[in-house]
Image: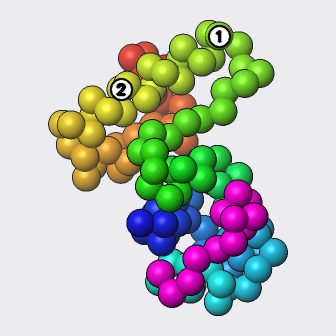
Amino acid sequence: MFHEKLRTLRQARNMSQVELAKRLGVTKQSVSNWENDNIQPSIEMLVRIAAVFAVSADYLLGIDAARAIDVSGLPEEVIAHLSQLVEDFRQSLGRHPRNLMAEIEPRVRTGDIDEKMV
């Protein structure tokens, strides 16, 4: 479970094993071993991995399926917009999950985002 979550989180951020290893202060071999389920990280390293990906250790271990985004310090209006974006993504995934990012990324880059998504 942990190894799958780690790989998925790293790849979703287009981060190489080498890049993650540097951020954590370990070798690429350690990251590879974790992702291949050969060994498990120490508790201290698990906490560091969770911090890098802004998830809980419970999420990484499969204890809690929910993920959280730290919005502390953001104005309530911004938090409301982010909540709406998340809901819009959920609805879009239901309609066409494979094409969602291909559809959204160019619009985000150019600033051409539908009113309902902001």
Circle 1 — which element? helix
Amino acid type at mark 2: Asp
The answer to whether residue 101 shows anywhere in this view is yes
User: How many labels, in total?
Assistant: 2
Identity of the residue drawn at 27% across and 39% down = 93
Relative to 113, residue 53 above or below:
below
Residue 76 is tagged as 1
Relative to 111, residue 105 above or below:
below
Q: Which residues are magenta?
A: 37-48
Spot occupied by residue 106 in the image (x, y as percentages of width and height):
45, 44
Identity of the residue drawn at 54% across and 31% down = 111
Query: Closer to the camera, 59 or 74?
Result: 59
Is residue 91 shown left or right of residue 49?
left
Residue 22 is tagged as none
Spot occupied by residue 108 in the image (x, y as percentages of width and height):
51, 37
- Measured in 3D between alpha carbons, the distance from the residue under mark 2 to the one under mark 1, in whole angstroms, is 18 Å
Identity of the residue drawn at 60% across and 18% down = 79
* Residue named by callout 2: 88
